[in-house]
Amino acid sequence: MKTNTFPTLRKRPANERGQSDHGWLQARFTFSFADYFDPDYMGFKALRVMNNDTIQPGGGFPTHPHSDMEIFTYVIDGQLAHKDSMGNDAIIEAGNLQYMSAGSGVIHSEFNPSQNHQTHLYQIWLHPSERGGEPRYAEMPMGDAAPPNALNLLFSGDGRDGSSQIRQSAEIFFGRVDASRAHDVPASESMPHVWLQVISGSVGVLGETLHVGDGLAVENQADGFRIQGLSNESRLLAFRLNEAASQQSS
């Protein structure tokens, strides 16, 4: 029998996020990360990292390891050069979303290949549902290629509807919506929690108004709900999540 629960909302305003400035890198942290710690923001369900980075020309992260983490990078502006121990050597263009499952272990580097332009991106980490496994890599071209006024499923735990399969019972959507248009987030009893992150523009969700950089946690919302566009070319990421326990990862 379905249990009736009331959804709870928690907004994470862009200007309240943690921040750091390393010269070559300016970062905003939705959740605790590196030297930024806030016990009230340690993640949301399996979602552990939501970093909004600006990398200066020629700057980047030299070769470093990861394991047991699902890593997603969405390039908003500029380019990101990626190399890894799986043999991938790619330039991630603006509007594209990259997926790397670190699995039992992977080594990679990330740099802004331009000497003149900044790279602006989100890097997102999800705990996997289980540890280990061979590392994986995939790219999803989005940006202007994504259908307008639609919510597009990019990644899922079962690879349904042409999405890339990931190691977590979660669904990740990319949306573009114009003013006076709307997206419907589908109902899901198995994944009743949603995190929304606004990339550009502004949207209205369940009585909340979200602007660039704002995030919103929606707990216990098994029913579908609507995302209303409040400005043209608003873009967002939506994460549908379950109650799966987090795995310790790095």
Image (spheres, rainbow, N blue to C red):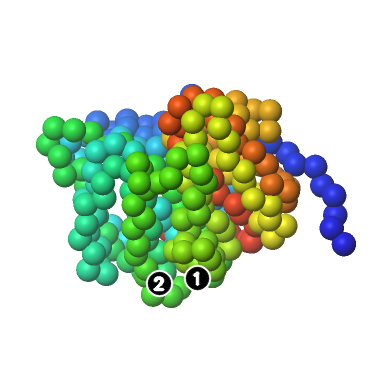
- Going by the numbered disc 1, the residue's amino acid type is Arg
**Observer able to see residue 210:** no
Query: Measured along the vertical axis of the image, is residue 12 above or below residue 190?
Result: above
**At 72% across and 51% down in the image, what residue appears?**
222
**At 24% across and 55% down in the image, what residue appears?**
82
**Could you tell me how far apart the alpha carbons at marks 1 and 2 are, in whole angstroms?**
7 Å
Q: Classify residue 176 as left or right of residue 221.
A: left
- Going by the numbered disc 2, the residue's amino acid type is Ser
Residue 248 location (% of width, % of height): 52, 61
Q: Quadrant of the N terminus?
A: bottom right
Q: Which residue is mark 1?
A: 131
> Secondary structure beneath disc 2?
loop
Residue 142 location (% of width, % of height): 37, 48
Residue 114 location (% of width, % of height): 15, 39
Q: Which residue is mark 2?
A: 104
Residue sticking out furthest to the bottom = 133
For marks 1 and 2 on the same chain, the one whose residue lies earlier in the sequence: 2
**At 50% across and 70% down in the image, what residue appears?**
131
* Crowd around label 2: few <14 · some 14–19 · many ≥20 (10 Å): some
Q: Classify residue 236 as left or right of residue 145.
A: right
Q: Classify residue 66 as left or right of residue 118.
A: right
Q: Quadrant of the C terminus?
A: bottom left
Residue 19, quarter of the rendered image: top left
Query: Measured along the vertical axis of the image, is residue 235 above or below residue 194?
Result: above
**At 69% across and 47% down in the image, what residue appears?**
224
Marks 1 and 2: CB-CB under 8 Å?
yes
- Numbered label attached to residue 194: none
